[in-house]
Amino acid sequence: MIGDRTVTVFTDEVMLGHHPEVDLPFLPSRVEKRVRTILQELDFKWSYPEHPGRLSAIMELLRQEPIQGVQFKAGPHATYEQLGRVHTATHLDHIFSLEGKRAWLDRDTTAVSPDSIKAATSAAGNAIAAVEAVVKGECQSAFALVRPPGHHAEPVRARGFCLFNNVAVAAAHAQARLGCERILIVDWDAHHGNGTQDIFWADPDVLFFDIHCAAPFYPGSGGLEDVGAGLGEGYTVNVPVPEDAGDIAFEKAFREILIPAAEHFEPDLVLVSAGFDPHRNDMALNLTYDGFAVLTRIVQDIADRHCDGKLALVLEGGYNLTSLSRGVHTVLEVLAGGDVPELVECGLNAVMEAAAFHRDAFTDEEG
Ligand SMILES: [Zn+2]
């Protein structure tokens, strides 16, 4: 029942200060194909899609529809030392040198405004705070609602709206300071978490499982045969899926690949790079809210089975404000102990109802 479990949301308004203003049009993938022709006739400019309204929309829905068992906290900013566990000094010095400025970091997707660096250290810091809270037993699970997102950020560079790799910084902190030895990171964002993969590519103590829309969808990495290297060989698990994959496919991947992998790995902490862009209303893929609920329950069960439920989620993408905010709300309800539905193919329930409705229409029998 909702309220049976304690959940802490870590977030901070400092992260609203990141708002690059972009004159150049940016049209993300599938949306691009669909609307570019329509928009050509109109004088329409896209603003930076990873904007402060994403967090505001989530917080507004949580205010309108509060969830029993969920409390809110703000974590401190990440320090240079904490960030330096996964990023090079060159990268960090470059990012910190941009404080107070506007700049492009990546030709197509990543830019900063004067307060972006504060937002980015807050995002990584709140991811760390979420991990600390679950490892220290202050709450059963935690969700760091942060931006800029992190999973595209590589050791040496910012990429794909991401400045620092929040989930990786949190995982490295758990290893370095909290006594965690084996960390499972599950990435269900629509895009491949190339940065997280790079950071833990040769690390056998972090199992990285990533289901994503297959290349050439951005960033184009995450092939089936990319499984890590050296001691880390076998500890990167990629599940590239076609653009129309939905709830049933995701559930099958989680049950038939993730659960056995976790069984083998026996994590002592479970982290999730939780993106909401695989929702059917967003950039790619066809998840519904029920799908997010089931995926959440599966990772929660994995955490319950292997590590006393220690589970922390970190927000990644999600650009449709309705499905982003409702998706986060759905996930938090499950974390708080809510029930999850059984998944069926989209539309199947409606067809079954229609079949029952029409059942007697074409028979000769009366009544
Ligand atoms: Zn994404």
Image: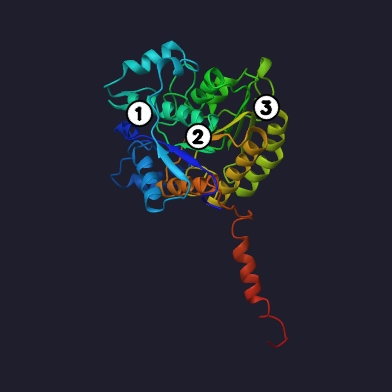
- Residue drawn at point x = 37 percent, y = 53 percent: 64
Q: Which residue is mark 2?
A: 138
The percent position of residue 300, horizontal first and vertical second, equals 60, 41
Q: Amino acid at mark 2?
A: Glu
Q: Which mark is residue 119?
A: 1
The answer to whether one can see residue 162 in this image is no
In primary-sequence order, the first of circles 1 and 2 is 1
Label 1, label 3: how far apart the Cα atoms are:
35 Å
- Which tag is nearer the camera, tag 3 or tag 2? 2
Left or right of 200 on screen, residue 83: left
Q: Which residue is mark 3?
A: 225
Q: Say which label, 3 or 2, has the lower sequence index.
A: 2
Task: Give the number of marks.
Answer: 3
**Residue 234: quarter of image:** top right
Residue type pointed to by label 1: Ala
Label 3 crowding class (10 Å Cα cut-off): few <14, some 14-19, many 20+? few
Q: Are marks 1 and 3 in contact (CB under 8 Å)?
A: no
41 over 220 or under it: above or below: below
Q: Of helix, strand and loop, which one carries label 3? A: loop
Judge: label 2 CB < 8 Å from ligand 1.
no
Q: Tell me where residue 240 appears, x and y as whole percent.
A: 62, 35
Q: Please tell me how crowded label 1 is: few (under 14), some (14-19), or many (20+) other residues with Cα within 10 Å.
A: many
Instruction: Report the residue that reaches farthest toward the bottom.
Output: 366
Q: Nearer the viewer, mark 1 or mark 2?
A: 2
Amino acid type at mark 3: Glu
Question: Residue 307, position in %: x, y?
Answer: 63, 32
Say which residue appears at 30% left-offset and 44% top-offset.
Answer: 44
For the residues labelled 3 and 2, the Cα–Cα distance comes to 39 Å
Residue density around tag 2, few if under 14, some if 14–19, many if 20 or more, within 10 Å:
some
Task: Give the residue drawn at x 52%, y 19%.
Answer: 177
